[in-house]
Every structure is written in C-alpha cells, then in structure tokens.
C-alpha cells in the first residue's frame, strides 16, 4: 500500500469546501504523458491554482501504473521547483469497478470517481457505497455520478443524455456517503458534443436542474464532466494544417463561468487539451516537414497546452490565486 500522503498529494475535501464557499471551481485536467503533466503543473503554478490531475482507465493502461505514481510524485516536486507548492490531487476519472478504485487507492491516488451512473439507481447506490467505505478508511475522497452524459469518448460512451433527477440527489448522497457528485445538466464528453448545423448554437445547460439539486443538497460539492468548450480558433487551426474536424461544438465558457460560481466546484476538461496539442503538432509538421525530433513538436504542443490551461484557470474556473 502506497498512501497518497507519502507522495505529497492531498485529497479533494478542503479544496472543494473552499471552492464552494469562494464561488470558483477546481480544474480537473486529464493527463496521459509527460508533456501534458508539465503543462498542467506549470500553468497552475503560474496562476497559483490548486489542481486535480485526472487519470482515466485508458490513461492508466497507456502510461503504466507505476510510472504514473512516480509522475504524480514528480509533479509535487516540480511545482515546488517552479516556486510554489500548489495542492495537487491525483484522481481516478470514471472508475468503473470497485477493484479499479481499490487498486488506485492502494497505489497513491488521493481521490477516485466511481461511475455507476449507467446502472439502475439501487445498483449505483450499492457500488458507490462500497467504494466510499473502502476509500474513507484511507482518507481518500470519492466522486459519484447521477444522470448520464451524452457523447462518445473511448471507454465513456452514451448515446443520449439522461439529465440528473434532482429528487434523487439527497437520497443518493445520504445513502452512499460520497464526497462529491457529478451531475448531468447538458454537458457532454468529447469534441463532437452536439449534432448542430453550421452556425447553430448547442442547447443551453440546464441551470434549472443545477439549482434544484443545490436546493436539495445545499453547499454539497457538485462536479461537471464534459466541460470542454472546443474553441473554434483551435479547430480552425487544426483544419488549416490538414486536419478534418467538422461541426465540432462545445460548452460556452460563459456558461461554465456561471456554473463555477455555484456549488459546482470541479470542472473536467480533457478534449480542449487534446485539440490544442493536435493543432500545435500539425502546424509544426506542415511548416517544417523535415522535423523529426519529438521535442520540437511536443515542445510547442506543451506550450500551447500551458496557455490554454492558464486561460481556463484565469477566465473560466476562477481558481487563480486560490492555492
Ligand atoms: O471523460 C473521459 C476522459 O476524457 C478520458 O478519456 O478514456 O479516452 O482517457 P479516455
Ligand atoms: P471533455 O471531453 O468535454 O473534455 O470532458 C472531459 C471529462 O469529463 C473527463 O472526465
Ligand atoms: Zn467525464
């Protein structure tokens, strides 16, 4: 058993308490490799923001569990070296079984998500409670989910949105003992979130559902998944340099800013980072077709990612200077 405190990590409890009180959200950025990690940490150190390093099941498989542990430990030291020891959470994104959550807890994660949202309600409660009981023995925080997001993303797939039913949230939180709750109010995973015609706007987020949830569990930490904004200028850059991404549309930053001011205290962003890296790498390959040193295309990708994350922290999440 490697406890997260040995790695210098923190769980999400105090960060969420402060975020709900302060009207901002903690960034939850996914990472799979060194450059993404460097970009996340340097952006959050520069803006003095706490951060949740998010690892999906696919990322664990891609990057190797042991390397991830050392990367997370390295991230803590890297932040100090950059001049500011920001609080860092290592979080399992979309954990699908008790065993996966247990294995993460035993290998240094300080927070896990158990995503039972696609199960019938009672099964979601049973599974989530099982994870909470195990995790809390080690002071690891747990995120549960009610409602299903639309969108297709690797291992996370769901054809249709099924909004969270506010009448279930209080019972779910009480029965499971979760520390935070992901809800479905119209966000969606991936870069192709909504089927809209060119120029058409996606449907607005259901702030009425968010408000109903908040009334039933006042001050309880709420999480938004699928919160990439799919910036049009980045998509245009990808297409300009030979990519082919059409009719992509995301969640507007104004709506996310509004959500961050409420009890939404964690906002998950992965796809925007993927887009930023892709745009930067494509640009290098088109402008310098002879380039073959990975540092010379992964480096610009890392720089673009760092700028994107700084923008999110400063202008969308509001978590700058909260570390
Ligand atoms: O919500 C899912 C995250 O974007 C992780 O995606 O399973 O492809 O690593 P992934
Ligand atoms: P995006 O695909 O919108 O970035 O959402 C990421 C996410 O929810 C990770 O859990
Ligand atoms: Zn998600």
Image: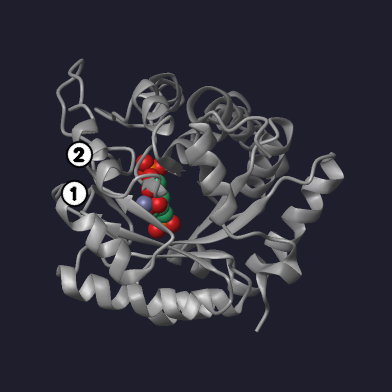
Q: Tag 2 or tag 1, which sits nearer the N-term?
A: 1
Q: Residues within 10 Å of mark 1 (few under 14, many from 20)?
A: many
Any mark on residue 166, and which?
1
Res 146 → quadrant: bottom left
Q: Which quarter of the rendering shows the N terminus?
A: bottom right
Residue 295 in the figure: left or right of residue 181: right
Please report contact status of discs 1 and 2: CB closer than 8 Å, yes or no.
yes
Residue shown at 65% from the left, 37% from the top: 49
The disc at residue 233 is none
User: Which picture quadrant has residue 106?
Assistant: bottom right
Q: Position of residue 266 (x, y in %)?
A: 46, 44
Residue 43 in sight = yes
Looking at the rendered image, the quarter that the C terminus falls into is: top right
Vertical placement of 288 versus 264: above or below?
above
**Residue 286 to residue 267: above or below:** above
Kindly identify which residue carries mark 2.
209
Query: Within 8 Å of ligand 3, the CB of disc 1?
Result: no
Can I make out residue 193 in this image? no
Question: How many neighbours does mark 2 have within 10 angstroms: few (below 14), some (14-19), or many (20 or more)?
Answer: some
């Amino acid at each position: 058993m490697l406890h997260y405190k040995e790695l210098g990590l923190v769980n999400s409890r105090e960060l969420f308490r402060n975020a709900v009180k302060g009207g901002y959200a903690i960034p939850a950025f996914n990472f799979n490799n060194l450059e993404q990690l460097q970009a996340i940490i340097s952006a959050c150190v520069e803006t003095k923001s706490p951060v949740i390093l998010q690892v999906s099941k696919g990322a664990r498989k891609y990057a190797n569990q042991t390397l991830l542990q050392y990367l997370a430990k390295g991230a803590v030291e890297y932040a100090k070296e950059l001049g500011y020891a920001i609080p860092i959470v290592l979080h399992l994104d979309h954990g699908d079984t008790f065993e996966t959550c247990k294995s993460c807890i035993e290998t240094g994660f300080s927070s896990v998500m158990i995503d039972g949202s696609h199960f019938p309600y009672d099964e979601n409660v049973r599974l989530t409670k099982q994870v909470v009981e195990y995790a809390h023995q080690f002071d690891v925080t747990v995120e549960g989910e009610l409602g299903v997001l639309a969108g297709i993303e690797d291992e996370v797939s769901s054809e249709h949105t099924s909004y969270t039913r506010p009448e279930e949230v209080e019972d779910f939180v009480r029965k499971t003992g979760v520390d935070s709750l992901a809800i479905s109010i119209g966000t969606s995973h991936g870069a192709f979130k909504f089927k809209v015609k060119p120029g058409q706007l996606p449907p607005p987020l259901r702030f009425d559902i968010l408000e109903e949830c908040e009334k039933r569990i006042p001050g309880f930490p709420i999480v938004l998944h699928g919160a990439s904004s799919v910036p049009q200028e980045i998509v245009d850059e990808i297409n300009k340099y030979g990519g082919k991404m059409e009719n992509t549309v995301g969640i507007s930053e104004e709506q996310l800013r509004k959500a961050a001011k409420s009890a939404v205290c964690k906002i998950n962003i992965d796809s925007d980072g993927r887009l930023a890296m892709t745009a930067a790498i494509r640009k290098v390959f088109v402008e310098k077709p002879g380039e073959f040193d990975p540092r010379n295309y992964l480096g610009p990708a890392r720089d673009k990612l760092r700028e994107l994350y700084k923008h999110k922290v400063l202008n969308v999440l509001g978590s700058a200077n909260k570390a």
